[in-house]
Amino acid sequence: MVRLFIILFICVLSFFTASSQSKVVQISTNFGNMKFRLYDDTPKHRDAFIELANEGYYNGTLFYRVIQDFLIQGGSKSSKDAPPGKRIGYGDPDKTVDDEIIAHYFHKKGSLCAPRQPDEVNPFKQSDISQFFIIKGSVHTAGALDTMELAINRPIRKKITDKFFTPEVRKELKQLKEEKKVEEFRAIANEVKDKIETEYSLHPATLEFSEAQREAYTTVGGYPELDGKYTIFGECISGFDVIDKIASLNTDKNNRPYTDVKITVTVLSE
């Protein structure tokens, strides 16, 4: 009886362990293979990508858009058997997926991402899962990340400051200072300061890189300018050298490599 219980326990444990394992796919090319772990908390993209991969949808397509220090993009069906010089890379409106943009995923090197149409025609940021792109990026210094934060945050703070620190308030504070009314001066100044800091802290567009982002962007590299704008649904676990090889290829005016990089996507674990 005890033996039977142990066997059943092991079977149940194995089932849940297998169920909790991340899905892994392999993207094979004539320049080598890359393996990617798909994220479980982006299930719409994960499942749609696996479904298309199992159908062979991506097989025979190209990495048709390659930009060194930025990305390699492929999967578009218009790239299959495309002759040299032909403009390719059109998406498939029937293969859109609702966005799953999650703050703790960012565009470090090897991130597997879904492209999408611009906000003007796609306000809900729906992804086009008929294609995908992989981040190459570059390594940034801590100072460069600081500069990015300042470039975004300084204009936001100035706009909020101007909203509360109006000419009328300035005039009133100047008069209180001249009259040496210290308590009144401090009361108004602190109130204005609190309003500025509160609105600034709640502003959705401010930029502050997390420790994880800073660690990644200053070591393996990436492309932080895309953070928060696209769905990232997986990451490279092997084959980073293949990303480098493809990203370094010579390209035409449309960023298509002169040497075709053909794709085969295989689901290794479901």
Image (cartoon, rainbow, N blue to C red):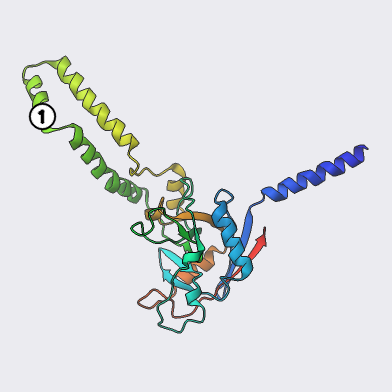
265 shown above or below 46: below
Task: From the top left corner, tell me how far across and down residue 28 is, in percent.
Answer: 59, 70
Residue 56 left/right relative to 206: right
Task: From the top left corner, tell me how far across and down residue 239 is, in percent.
Answer: 56, 64
Which image quarter: residue 32?
bottom right
Q: Nearer the viewer, residue 238 or 186?
A: 186
Give me the residue at 54% from left, 76% from top.
262
Task: From the top left corner, tell me how far across and down residue 68 is, in percent.
Answer: 41, 67
Give me the residue at 59% from left, 50% from top.
40
Residue located farthest toward the right when viewing the structure as drawn:
1
Judging from the image, what secondary structure is the residue with disc 1 in? helix
Give me the residue at 57% from left, 61% from top.
49
Give me the residue at 43% from left, 52% from top.
217
112 shown above or below 191: below
Residue 43 left/right relative to 96: right
Task: From the top left corner, tell me how far across and down residue 158 is, in percent.
Answer: 21, 40
Residue 29 left/right relative to 182: right
41 shown above or below 62: above
238 shown above or below 199: below
Which image quarter: residue 37?
bottom right
Q: Dividing the image into 4 quarters, which one contains the N terminus? A: top right
Q: Dividing the image into 4 quarters, which one contains the C terminus? A: bottom right
Amino acid carrying label 1: it is Glu
Mark 1 lies on residue: 168
